[in-house]
Amino acid sequence: MAHHITIVELRPDNWQRLRDIRLRALASDPQAFGATFETESGFDESAWRSMLDKATFLTAVSDGGDVATMSIENLKGDFGTTCWIGGCWVAPEVRGHGVMRAFMTHVDSQAELRKWSRQGLGVWQDNFDAMAAYERLGFIKHGDPQPSTRQPGKFYQRMFRDA
């Protein structure tokens, strides 16, 4: 079944939507994140609003509900990156239906205006499905796996792409 995907940029007043999709992601696929459900489920409204002030959060909407999330943070990073993409998660029922491509199309459409032209991200080195998905979107592995500061003992692979 084809899913129509709409990308929405969340604002601070949408903090409940961010909370709901983030907690769903952390509960569904805890191994994919540096953050934990236990920590973020305790956040209050001001903490969620603060997250929305620090980074741009996107959600993908399908059939009237939020089914995916991604954050983009403007920062100067490794290998000349101008933004860092994080917190990517797609609900199992819409995986393989172009959600990440829709996210990246949105990011690319804003790249010049918002200084998102060289995009970096980190993916756990054992998350082969995610790495393959990012490669299909034009991301290239760069450098050696790096130790996680939030999850000691785990390593992430840096990847980047140009819009």
Image (cartoon, rainbow, N blue to C red):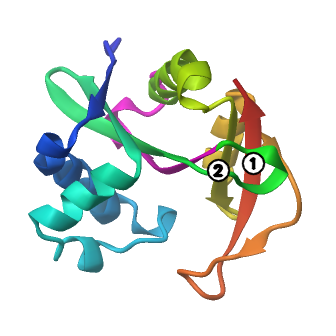
* Position of residue 9 measured from the top left corner of the image (x, y, whole percent): 31, 30
Contact between labelled residues 1 and 2, with CB atoms less than 8 Å apart: yes
Magenta residues (range): 83-98
* Position of residue 116 measured from the top left corner of the image (x, y, whole percent): 61, 32
In this orientation, which residue lies closer to the viewer: 163 or 54? 54
Going 24% across and 48% down the picture, which residue do you hit?
A: 21
Establish if 60 lies above or below 144: above
Q: Can residue 138 be seen in this view?
A: yes
> Any magenta on residue 152?
no
- Quarter location, residue 44: bottom left
Element class at badge 2: strand
Q: Which amino acid does label 1 sit on?
A: Met
For the view shown, which residue lies furthest in the right direction?
143
For the view shown, which residue lies furthest in the bottom direction?
152
Q: Which amino acid does label 2 sit on?
A: Leu
- Quarter location, residue 145: bottom right
Element class at badge 1: strand
Establish if 145 lies above or below 18: below
In this orientation, which residue lies closer to the viewer: 153 or 113? 113
Establish if 38 lies above or below 141: below
In this orientation, which residue lies closer to the viewer: 130 or 93? 130
Residue linked to disc 2: 121
* Position of residue 39 measured from the top left corner of the image (x, y, whole percent): 27, 79
Whichever of callouts 2 and 1 sits on the residue coming sooner in the sequence is 2
Residue linked to disc 1: 159
Q: Is residue 139 visible?
A: no
Going 40% across and 67% down the picture, which residue do you hit?
A: 30
Alpha carbon separation for disc pair 2 and 1: 5 Å
Going 75% across and 34% down the picture, which residue do you hit?
A: 161
Q: How packed is label 2: few (under 14 Cα within 10 Å), some, or many (20 or more)?
A: many
* Position of residue 101 measured from the top left corner of the image (x, y, whole percent): 54, 23
